[in-house]
Image (cartoon, rainbow, N blue to C red):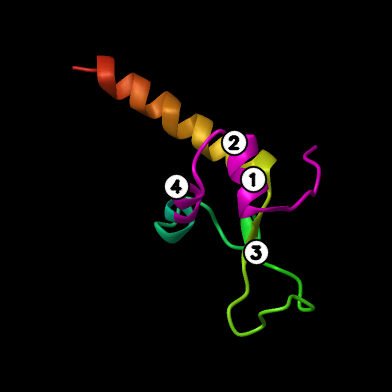
Amino acid sequence: MFENTWNSSKDAAKELGIQEYELSNLREYGFFKPGIHWRSAPLDHLKPWSPEAIYNSKLCRKVINKMKLKNEFNKYAA
């Protein structure tokens, strides 16, 4: 199954080959689900009033790959 590894947005973006703002947009637009693809940083984070999101890169990659496949299909469809 998938490892339960959570990465900072910087590390996740690097691993996924996208920019941090793209990662954030995917989260904001609902492609990444809270608790599955992303979650707030642990409670002991230095900024409790504005916690940073951390990402499960392996599960995020599945979403991104599915989006790429759908885009390729749409390019050649009808």
Q: Is residue 28 above or below residue 48?
A: above
Q: Is residue 10 magenta?
A: yes
| Residue kind at label 2, given as amino acid type | Leu
In the image, what residue occupies the spot 66% across and 43% down?
57
Of tags 3 and 4, the one toward the viewer is: 4
Q: Secondary structure at mark 1?
A: helix
Using residue 54 as the reference point, say whether residue 29 is left or right of it.
Answer: left
Separation of disc 2 and disc 3 at Cα? 17 Å
Question: Could you say where residue 40 lies in the image, as x and y percent from the top left?
Answer: 65, 69
The answer to whether the residue labelled 2 contacts the one labelled 3, judged by CB atoms less than 8 Å apart, is no
The answer to whether the residue labelled 2 contacts the one labelled 4, judged by CB atoms less than 8 Å apart, is no
- Which label sits on residue 16? 2
The residue identified by callout 1 is: 12
Whichever of labels 3 and 4 marks the residue nearer the N terminus, that label is 4
Separation of disc 2 and disc 4 at Cα? 10 Å
- Which label sits on residue 47? none
Q: Secondary structure at mark 4?
A: helix
The residue identified by callout 4 is: 22
In the image, what residue occupies the spot 81% across and 43% down?
3
Question: Could you say where residue 77 lies in the image, as x and y percent from the top left?
Answer: 24, 17
The answer to whether the residue labelled 1 contacts the one labelled 2, judged by CB atoms less than 8 Å apart, is yes
Task: Point out the stretch of residues depicted in magenta.
Answer: 1-24
Of residue 68 and residue 13, the one placed in the foreground of this image is 13
The residue identified by callout 3 is: 39
Of tags 2 and 3, the one toward the viewer is: 2
